[in-house]
């Protein structure tokens, strides 16, 4: 069976991972004033982040047009599409329309998963998908397994800079300024329904690391033979330290450390960290 895995560009992957797992990435678009950035392999991510730091206005994003999903489905016998949370973006709806367009051309229907998360969470899902496909599991069983996997996974993130949240009206300017002056770190994550919730308030990096470990412990999730993904925006030192602490305490099968994509970098901002398990 000719399976194909498709993910929007909020799924953080290295070029090697894309190649090894055969994943097609469908790009979102970021808009900064009158300038647009396509979140594809040609994006100068570091240049985009530098421009973002100096831009005083709101930075927005747009879902991929449905035609890009239709083209990605192409001639695959079976396609699986993973999108960022439907509560955060219109990408899931765009994928549904693109799939309907593909079916109208006589191409088999793709299975579309609302990840109910983003960034490292999407990465975790496509890794699991690839493992199940490689194991020879039947399509209906893959769909059942991934839906259950999405319902039980956890995604958390912490930001170093709250400028973008302030610019986009998701955090009051005074509140964001006080948070940074007092060195307060907000640990946020998905609430299980695809929306963002606040989980912890910390003082400094050491407490953030301690709380991250505690969140894994309190989750009650089995870690043996499971994967964990850490996405970082120019913060490989923190990501590596977190991975080391997790390996010392838990028995995850693999810990993947990946850089954030353009759209993930827009939301996490410089030095942001996302992890999912």
Image (cartoon, rainbow, N blue to C red):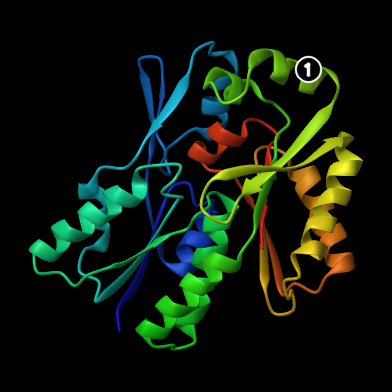
Residue 37 found in image quarter = top left
Vertical comparison of 136 with 198: above or below: below
- Quadrant containing the C terminus in the rendered view: bottom right
- Image vertical order of residue 170 relative to residue 91, above or below: above
Residue at x 73% of width, y 76% of height: 222
Q: Relative to 190, does residue 263 appear above or below in the rendering?
A: above
Residue 29, picture quadrant:
top left
Q: Position of residue 276 (x, y in %)?
A: 65, 57
Q: Nearer the viewer, residue 10 or 153?
A: 153
Give the residue drawn at x 52%, y 57%. 122
Q: Residues within 10 Å of mark 1 (few under 14, many from 20)?
A: few
Say what secondary structure mark 1 lies in.
helix
Q: Residue at x 61, y 36 (%)?
A: 268
Q: Residue 48, position in %: x, y?
A: 51, 27
Name the image quarter holding the N terminus: bottom left
Toward the viewer: 63 or 194?
Answer: 194
Q: Is residue 70 visible?
A: no
Q: Is residue 5 visible?
A: yes
Report the residue marked by disc 1: 178
Q: Position of residue 124 (x, y in %)?
A: 57, 63
């Amino acid at each position: 069976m000719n399976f194909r895995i498709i993910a929007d560009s909020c799924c953080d992957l290295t070029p090697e991972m894309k190649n090894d797992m055969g994943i097609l990435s469908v790009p979102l678009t970021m808009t900064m004033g009158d300038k647009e950035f396509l979140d594809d392999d040609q994006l100068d991510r570091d240049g985009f982040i530098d421009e973002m730091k100096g831009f005083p206005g709101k930075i927005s994003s747009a879902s991929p047009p449905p035609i890009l999903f239709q083209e990605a489905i192409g001639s695959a016998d079976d396609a699986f599409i993973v999108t960022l949370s439907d509560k955060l973006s219109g990408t899931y709806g765009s994928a549904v329309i693109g799939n309907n367009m593909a079916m109208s051309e006589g191409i088999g229907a793709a299975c579309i998963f609302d990840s109910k998360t983003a960034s490292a969470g999407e990465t975790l899902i496509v890794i699991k998908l690839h493992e199940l496909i490689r194991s020879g599991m039947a399509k209906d069983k893959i769909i059942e397994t991934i839906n259950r996997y999405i319902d039980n996974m956890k995604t958390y993130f912490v930001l170093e800079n709250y400028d973008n949240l302030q610019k986009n009206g998701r955090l009051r300017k005074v509140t964001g300024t006080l948070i940074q002056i007092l060195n307060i770190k907000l640990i946020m994550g998905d609430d299980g329904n695809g929306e963002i919730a606040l989980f912890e308030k910390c003082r400094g990096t050491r407490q953030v690391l301690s709380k991250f470990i505690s969140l894994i412990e309190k989750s009650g999730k089995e870690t043996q033979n499971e994967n964990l993904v850490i996405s970082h925006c120019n913060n490989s030192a923190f990501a590596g330290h977190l991975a080391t602490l997790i390996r010392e305490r838990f028995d995850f099968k693999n810990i993947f450390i990946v850089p954030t994509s353009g759209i993930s970098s827009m939301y996490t901002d410089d030095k942001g960290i996302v992890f999912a398990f």
